[in-house]
């Protein structure tokens, strides 16, 4: 179990760092407005963003099996591990075909599913983080949808970046849970 925990934490951390690569837009010239252009547009602006998205996806996919060993045997714990893995596959697909609406919707749904699964099985102190994270994930998704419907000039870029921050923080809390939670005993 120790090896599974180390593998999960290392892969998850790599995924988090790569998923946060959008912050490089403040260093790497992209020609995109962070306020008006969605963060998704970064994938077409510079190859470094697509590569980072692919690395994040691969790391999340590979973290799935060790997370399955660490998650409780009941379905809600397994759903959390599966959600991370499927989110990784969606990030790989996004790196291959950026800007696909179906992938974007599926990634949002997978993130909501994963956050909801944490609400259902994390212990009380941790559950508060999961509930807050789920609420913020839903609010930021709604803001992104409304800004996208309203069109240019309605801060879609800002809201997509806030959404990325919320997701990254929730994933970071997940890593912390894996680090400090007791390892389940197998009989």
Image: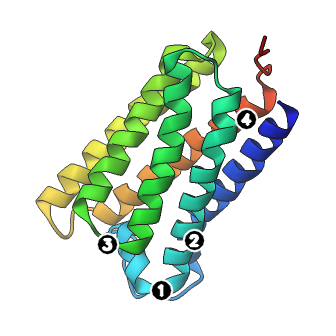
Residue 2's x, y, as percent? Answer: 87, 33
**Residue at figure coordinates x 34%, y 72% from the top left:** 97
Q: Looking at the rendered structure, which numbered label has been put on residue 52?
A: 2
**Residue at figure coordinates x 19%, y 59% from the top left:** 148
As drawn, the residue found furthest toward the left would be: 150
Tell which circle, 1 or 3, labels the residue nearer the N-terminal end: 3
Tell which circle, 4 or 1, labels the residue nearer the N-terminal end: 1
Residue topped by disc 3: 37
For residue 52, side relative to residue 161 (left or right): right
Residue topped by disc 1: 46
Q: CA distance from mark 3 to mark 4?
A: 32 Å
Q: Is residue 56 above or below residue 116?
A: below
Residue 1's x, y, as percent? Answer: 82, 30
Q: Are marks 4 and 2 in contact (CB under 8 Å)?
A: no
What SS does tag 2 mark? helix
Tell which circle, 4 or 2, labels the residue nearer the N-terminal end: 2
Q: Residues within 10 Å of mark 1 (few under 14, many from 20)?
A: some
Q: CA distance from mark 4 to mark 1?
A: 31 Å
What SS does tag 4 mark? helix
**Picture quadrant where residue 98 is located:** bottom left
Tell which circle, 2 or 1, labels the residue nearer the N-terminal end: 1
Q: Nearer the viewer, mark 3 or mark 2?
A: 2
Tell which circle, 3 or 2, labels the residue nearer the N-terminal end: 3
Q: CA distance from mark 1 to mark 3?
A: 14 Å
Q: CA distance from mark 3 to mark 2?
A: 19 Å
Residue 166 shows in the view = no
> Which colour assignment does the render follow?
rainbow
Tell which circle, 3 or 4, labels the residue nearer the N-terminal end: 3
**Residue at figure coordinates x 60%, y 42% from the top left:** 64
Q: CA distance from mark 4 to mark 2?
A: 22 Å
As drawn, the residue found furthest toward the right would be: 2
Residue topped by disc 4: 176
């Amino acid at each position: 179990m120790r090896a599974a925990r180390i593998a999960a934490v290392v892969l998850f951390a790599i995924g988090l760092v790569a998923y946060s690569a959008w912050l490089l837009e403040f260093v790497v010239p992209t020609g995109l407005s962070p306020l008006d252009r969605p963060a998704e547009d970064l994938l077409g602006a510079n190859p470094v963003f697509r590569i980072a998205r692919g690395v994040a996806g691969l790391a999340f996919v590979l973290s799935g099996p060790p997370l399955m060993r660490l998650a409780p045997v009941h379905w809600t714990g397994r759903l959390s591990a599966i959600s991370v893995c499927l989110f990784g596959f969606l990030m790989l697909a996004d790196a291959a075909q950026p800007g696909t609406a179906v992938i974007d919707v599926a990634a949002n749904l997978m993130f909501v599913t994963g956050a909801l699964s944490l609400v259902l099985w994390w212990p009380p102190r941790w559950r508060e983080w999961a509930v807050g994270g789920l609420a913020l994930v839903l609010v930021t998704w709604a803001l992104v949808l409304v800004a996208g419907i309203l069109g240019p000039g309605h801060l879609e870029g800002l809201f997509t970046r806030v959404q990325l921050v919320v997701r990254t923080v929730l994933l970071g809390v997940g890593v912390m849970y894996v680090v400090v939670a007791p390892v389940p005993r197998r009989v």
